[in-house]
Amino acid sequence: MNIASWLHQTALCWPDRPAVFEGDRLHLSYDGLAGAVSDRARHLARVHGIVKGDRVAIFAKNAAEYLETLHACWWIGAVAVPINGKLHPAEAAWIVRDSGAKLAFTDTGDVLGACPGLTELALGAPVPAGGQRTAPVACDRTDLAWLFYTSGTTGRPKGVMLTHDNLRQMTLCYALDVDQARAGDHMLYAAPMSHGAGLYMFAQIRAGGAHLVPASHGFDPAEIMALARSHGDLVFFAAPTMVKRLVTAARAAGYDGSGIRTIIYGGGPMYAADIDEAVAAFGPRFVQIYGQGESPMTISVLPRALVADRSHPNWQARRASVGFAHGAVAVSIRDADGRELAPGETGEICVEGPTVMRGYWNRPEATAETLKDGWLHTGDLGHLDAEGFLHLTDRSKDVIISGGTNIYPREVEEALLLHPAVFEVAVIGEHDDDWGERVVAFVVTAGTEAADAVTLDLWCRQQIAAFKRPKRYVFVDALPKNNYGKVLKTDLRAMAADQPPAVPGLNRPTNR
């Protein structure tokens, strides 16, 4: 089944429904969108020789033509290679070369000079229109559709091979567990369409709802509030940092979330204090998902009723979790030897189901290391509680081992974020001759209250065990992040190596 067949069917059933908006301007109806896709697909095949299985890269900001180009690739059975438009051209060029793409669409059509022999076109460049409209070619469920390059914070990204069936099963999970797509909805693309936001397009297409690309082509809180008022029923994916910025701007503007129907958050840790504030500001509009590119958007889900709930005796722990397993997958916690652990025991999160990738592109060793006995080994640590809720701890590589005891940075970060003077925080470990590692906290203050190392140390003593508290605080204006909003802890470790002790009295790890 070709995933593009959903667009073809929707255009036949509801040709006059609005399909794509740019800001407040209607760009295309569903009939117009299917026609534009068919024209672009024909141009790819006849002029550029793209055939089934060929890779076509898209390195561009969000745009109405992004949807057209993705579906034009699938229409003829080609593989889309979406690349975050915020990456450096040299990073994008590496992905293009690694994928073996024959063609690349970019914002201007002239940015990938490091790829000799590559045909590069401007996204949205006009193509001849009016030819006979064709249906999408037949595809097997295991055929590649989307080559998704991971956004890891270390090393080169790997190409995750997502099939047409992976995308279909992901979308069925969305409809079952996340949100019911409706014809009157407006799917807003404020996060990169090359990643999670773009993956959610399929449910909206199947339902015949509209797609809304902001005029800014990205995330702007003031613009989102204005679009919510003018369109209504906005549905969008946002990283936790985006939610935090939107809520901060909304409080300053006196905006209560009217016109927003659903905000799906994921892609990084959402701390308890931040989601509490978001729910207080906007009400029951939030759904949490946890996934990876290797099982896109589909490991676990915390539905809006549970995010907003305050009646259950265990509501706080539930809200702090990442929910329960998506309907199409199984989640298991396993130790280093692959043995399944009991509820409450921390180990590696493993996933099995039809959303799990086919493997890594041209990386057989990495594939074998990650896919074992039918299970995806995520590299994330966590535990399941007795009710089946999944609680994330950290990436396995980020665990701090001090004096032979594991310290999980997220637990320390959660404690610090409860202090009103702390806006953002990231915790890492650094070498210590006596204890192996010690805890270092990088803190961005809220600017409304004074904060210093002594104050925060006293606060931590009231929140967590003494041995877990940071032994050093580094105050910074901002945390280093990649283009997906993930904190770059590798950069923080480099910064820590260059930083002098902030408060000598707090640097003695013997004070446990």
Image (cartoon, grey):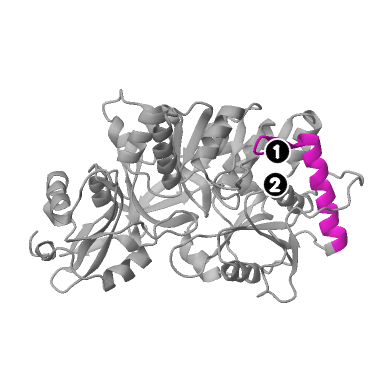
The quadrant in which the C terminus is found is: bottom left
Left or right: where does residue 386 sit relative to residue 129?
Answer: left
Q: Which mark is residue 20?
A: 1
Q: Nearer the viewer, residue 36 or 23?
A: 23
At mark 2, the secondary structure is helix
Q: Vertically, is 208 above or below 149?
A: above
- Looking at the image, which residue is at 74% across and 29% down? 17
Amino acid type of disc 1? Val
Amino acid type of disc 2? Leu
Q: Residue furthest top?
A: 311
Classified by dominant secondary structure, the portion drawn in magenta counts as helix
- Looking at the image, which residue is at 52% across and 41% down? 237
Query: In which quadrant of the rendered view does residue 421 lie?
Result: top left
Using the rendered image of the protein, determine whether residue 115 is visible from the camera's viewpoint.
yes
Q: Which residue is mark 2?
A: 67
Boundaries of the magenta span: 22-47
Residue 166: give x, y in percent of width and height: 60, 48
Residue 290: give x, y in percent of width and height: 44, 45
Using the rendered image of the protein, determine whether residue 328 is visible from the camera's viewpoint.
no
